[in-house]
Amino acid sequence: MALLRSTHPAFAQSRRLPNRWDLAALLCVFGALVALAQAVRGTLAPIDAPEAVTIHLDAIYLPYYALRTTLRMFAALAASLLFTLIYAAGAAKSRRAALVMVPALDILQSVPILGFLTFTVVFFMNLFPGKVLGLELAAIFAIFTSQAWNMAFSLYQSLITVPAELREAARCFQLSAWQRFWRLEVPFGTPGLVWNTMMSMSGGWFFVVAAEAVSVGDQTWKLPGIGSYVAQALEARDIRAVCYAIAAMLAVILAYDQLLFRPLVAWSAKFRFEDVPTAGPPEPWLLRLMRRTRLLRQGGEAFGQALTAFGGMRLAKRPHAVLSRAENSRLGDFAFSAVLLGVVGLAVWQIVAMIATSLGWADVLQALGLGCITLVRVSVLMALASLVWVPVGVWLGLRPVWARRAQPVAQFAAAFPANLLFPPVVLFIVYFQLNPDIWLSPLMILGTQWYILFNVIAGASVMPPDLIWAAGNFRVGGWLWWKRVMLPGIFPYYVTGAITASGGSWNAAIVSEVASWGDTKLTAHGLGAYIAQATTAGDMTRVVLGVAVMCGFVLLVNRLLWRPLHAYGVRRFTFD
Amino acid sequence: MDGMATPKILLEVRKCQQAYHKDASTDLVVLDDVNLELVEGEIVGLLGRSGSGKSTLLRIVAGLLAPTAGEVMWRGAPLTGPAQGVAMVFQSFALFPWLTVQENVELGLEAQGIARTEREKRAESAIDLIGLGGFESAYPKELSGGMRQRVGLARALVVHPDLLLMDEPFSALDVLTAETLRTDLIDLWMEARLPLKSMLMVTHNIEEAVLMCDRILIFSSNPGRVAHEIRVPFAHPRDRMAVDFRRMVDDIYALMTRRAVAAPSAAPAHPLAIPLPPINPNQMAGLLEELEGPPYHGKADLPHLAEALQLEVDELLPLGEALHLLGFAVLAEGDLRLTPAGREFVAAGTEERKAQFGTALRAHVPLVRMIRQVLDERWNHRAAAMRFRDELEDHMSPDYAEETLRTAIGWGRFAEIYSYDEEEQQFSLEDLD
């Protein structure tokens, strides 16, 4: 069950409470965002609208739109990979850099990306005035920000856990730093990286759909793609077009799942560092095809050889003996601290200046209050989703045949951009005149609940059969069975899924607390709606405030609830 | 190979010292004043207990680690990093799981930038030499331990090193596989089919050292020093059952136990500086029972005991030392002798044993006494493990401190002197009657 076992969360830091490096990273990240917002605000007015892009609702255009959407995904993927390799290598090689780079990743992971769509769109459009390219880049950047952090985290974690003897072997046989990176470090990190990349990409569909149609103030920009097609359909109140879009997206995700996700994850099992071969899931048909078809196989081999040659280049220094005592270069430490203090100071100044000029304490309080409402919403929904999906996941996970069938379906469902499913729900609410504060809420968890399901399935399916049999032997049943046997057994897996689901739900709040159908606007009270409305109004400072508050909520929930739970689960409930 | 007029010196280690830097107190010395000279044509063994610094020395020779003091000369020039002409075989094999046997073997050649056809040719001949023919396209995880170590050997031999370093190369293998591999290697060496000039191996297995090496350096622990040097004059192939062979094994046992007992009593100025071996009370009880019964009746010769119990010297010595420390037995000159306290322990029932163990702990282990004392003094009878770990680290390396604390936790729990909460990392007096 190689596929089921690889659900590592992208973080596993042992420390729980924020420390001063977290604070430094947090301030740096927000300082940068504020600076971006300021820069954008100054130049908001004179933007030229790009040449009008008309989105046709005719189904014949859909394949083309789907292709554009997919290409955007791959462009972002390439950027994310490049970023990951550089960032992770940098953080892993330098003790000082890691002190700030690692917490920064952690914070960037919890920043609600959709809140920033506005800035980034304006920023990139300023770079390429009047060109669609700016908009394209903004969309790609949005997807990039949804993928890159957790990929970089995964690779960083692998790089710092390469077994000592493998490192020594590589140095002993005189591999240069470049060769070690490509021969040892990257392959060692490949299983984790591939898994996290594929999960990020699954999550990315949601953002590409959201990023294709952006409105700031009274201007709306659209890029040809499935997301803008749906936006157009909503404006035109065309439910048939919405259905077409859903069908097209299903086809795209199915192709992604079959042609990329499954073959890649199965292939990456080869790099897993383990002693005994494990019987993996059946080989995906694409890999089988590649092995059997001569042309494809030769193509694959040529590609592999090119990569080998690339990684084998004798660049960089030969290895040398290391002193076992860590060389404390005081001067370096001092310079590093000085530069960091300077950056943090600048960031604080930016933030204070912004709050002082255009925001009052009342605004902060309002945002905090709305944040609490959204927190309640997320909590209730998480509880409901857990109540439903934990029993279902356990039931499926204990039946290997069903688990094998259900797992890919759940992963598939998680990849499907839930925002495409919003219109039918909105239509439903409008038709029955329901209270949006309650009925818009389920949208938040529509796309993210699946993470709980497939992690629970994974957890239940690796539960040692001996324990289940022992429980049966002692007639442990009913609630006692759940309390003493099953819930502890799946606990770490559940927490892994819940972390992803809860983080995703906060993000989804920005698009799900406000919905529209033609001219009818539905708004729920909450932080997501606050950010969405500030975005529509072009009010950059409120967007930053809302995003900062949301980021704070997500970080606090992670640090005070999920991370301790995860650490506890790993300590107490893993079978080693 | 045999008896040239003046064998050439390959490697020289002079006054080598390796120390841990501790910020607060003095440096912790792992390896002290080690001298070693290696000439062409010999196999030298570094024998010692775990923690005696022998693996550290091997890494210094490999150019992976720079010594804190002293110098290493490789073929007359100072060594500054992994040198061409030195290759290493690892205890855990250290094969790259994503490379096939062939690709693993080619790794060192590839790093040197040798052309592909040449690489393949040399790899194939190394693979055939070491008996791996037919496994070229297998991945390491498909192979058994013995076959994996053969890949490790082929990978080292293919670069045609002058010196082969081996770090406990057979200790992760089962007895039979290890024996086959040892004899195969010695046969190839004797037939001069290995592209090598000399071998340096680390081991904690006395018989293995006597079986393979021409010269054995015995290390003492804490700090690691070369305590003895022994020449093994026997011709290959050697017979384990030969009288001379057995005598040499016995002698080495005696040497190692003498050092082991002498070291803790002579060295520590501070009572906390005694490292506690990772031995649990049940193992101690088992050995005491074995010792009391026939055929030993209270006194056993360590090599015999090791053979009868299928324990390696590295496993048996810490056990003997623990018993010695607690006053249940006396370890001296390669023998283990039961004391009256030990006899009493064997005769007692479960509850009495706990009580006796507790008495022995309080009498002989200052760390346990100190933990209990601190707990008694605190109003809430709780104390963080960190506090004791820090104190231990002033007297030993962090690894030893951790191990010693773990042992103290286990022993104290068994004797119900205190309890320990793993989740909170705290000692307490809860749940004690």
Image: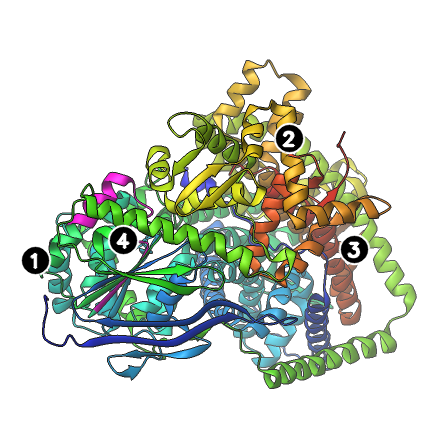
Residue beneath the point at 75% across and 32% down = B432
Q: Residues within 10 Å of mark 3 (few under 14, many from 20)?
A: many
Determine the CA span between mark 2 and mark 1.
58 Å
- Same chain, marks 4 and 1? yes
Q: Which residues are magenta?
A: B163-183
* Discs 4/3, front: 4
**Mark 4 vs 2, N-terminal side:** 4
Residue A398: percent from left, percent from top: 51, 26
Residue A400: percent from left, percent from top: 45, 27
Q: How many marks?
A: 4
Tell me the amino acid under the disc marked 3: Leu
- Same chain, marks 3 and 2? no
Instruction: Report in which chain the residue with disc 3 lies.
Output: A
Please give the residue where the numbered disc 1 appears in the rendered image. B191
Residue B62: percent from left, percent from top: 33, 69
**Residue toward you, A398 or B272:** B272
Badge 3 marks a residue whose secondary structure is: helix
Q: Residue B354's mark?
A: 2
Marks 1 and 2: in contact by CB < 8 Å? no
Q: Which scheme is used to colour this image of the protein?
A: rainbow
Badge 2 marks a residue whose secondary structure is: helix
Residue B169 covered by magenta stretch = yes
